[in-house]
Image: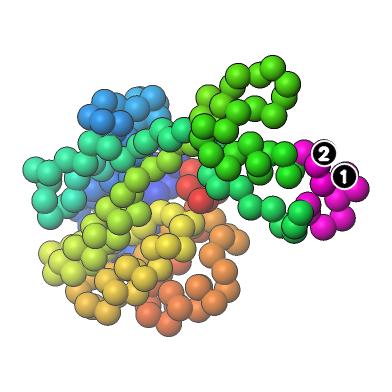
Amino acid sequence: MRHFMVELVRAVTSLAPQIEYLAIRAYGGWLDRGSVTSGASKAMRALEGSDPFPIAHPSRRAILHGEVRLANALLSVPEVEFVDTYRVREGPPRIRLAGSPVPGGCASDPSACPAAILKRFTRSTRKNCPASGCAVTCGDAFKTYEQKMVDTLIACDLVEAGSSPDLDLVALLTCDTDLLPPLVYASSMRRTELAVITPDPCWRSHHVEILNGIGVHLLPAESSYVDTR
């Protein structure tokens, strides 16, 4: 992880060698009703052990200072903390079959097709298991773990930072194309340089064309450190 953090610093300073301070914000489902999640605890331990600052400036004779922190609030409104960015919901995401009454090519009888049985079982969290004598419900059998408000938090911060004349560069480490619209919007303000750090291939070619067209820099990254949702 520390190796990656150092490489991240090198990538950012290669685009903006004048940078003297680098703030790294990690986004995710860090809080569940105000309590720190296990994922947040692991992330904090990893970040504490890999914090590279202060570090010799990769581009010139100087010391680069910075900080690494988990993001639980907006850049522009730091006093309001979002305490439920991680949620556990009963049941799985809604299941849809590729075909009806069974997926195409299925050799099973429709009443015995495992995929069709699973679809019926997961129709409601109160639905009982189809196995004879089993009292387990769908809500008992499945849980969905999801992040909430994280993409919109990133989008708001991206627009806020991208519109600031006081910043030299805003770099976004992601594979999530949901963040393309705020990137386009932030670039339209033409206040600061923007970059996307992402493994290749990750974004589709027409997304890359959009980023190139609006002047957003694209930098390679190690795929193991990028959220590929």
**Seen from this angle, which residue lies furthest left?**
79
Image position of 155 (left or right of 141): left
Left or right: 64 as drawn, with respect to 109: left
Label pair 1/2, CB-CB below 8 angstroms: yes
Q: Look at the image and say whether residue 113 sits in the magenta stretch.
A: yes
Residue 68 marker: none
**From the viewer's perspective, is residue 112 above or below residue 158?**
above
Q: Which mark is residue 109?
A: 1
Could you tell me the amino acid type at mark 2?
Ala
In which image quadrant can residue 119 be found? top right
Question: In this view, which residue lies farthest toward the right?
Answer: 107
Which region shows up in magenta?
102-114
Which amino acid is tagged 1?
Answer: Asp
Q: Which residue is rendered at x = 77% and y = 38% of the image?
A: 114
Is 190 drawn above or below residue 30 in the view shown?
A: below
Disc number placed over residue 112 in the picture, else none = 2
Instruction: Using the image, determine if residue 181 lies above or below residue 72.
Output: below
Task: Looking at the picture, tell me which residue is in the foreground, 36 or 60.
Answer: 36
**Whether residue 62 is visible:** no
Q: Residues within 10 Å of mark 2 (few under 14, many from 20)?
A: few
- Residue depicted at x 65% and y 41%: 120
Asked whether the viewer can see residue 42, the reply is: yes
Q: Position of residue 13 (x, y in %)?
A: 32, 57
Looking at the rendered image, the quarter that the N terminus falls into is top left
Q: Residues within 10 Å of mark 1 (few under 14, many from 20)?
A: few
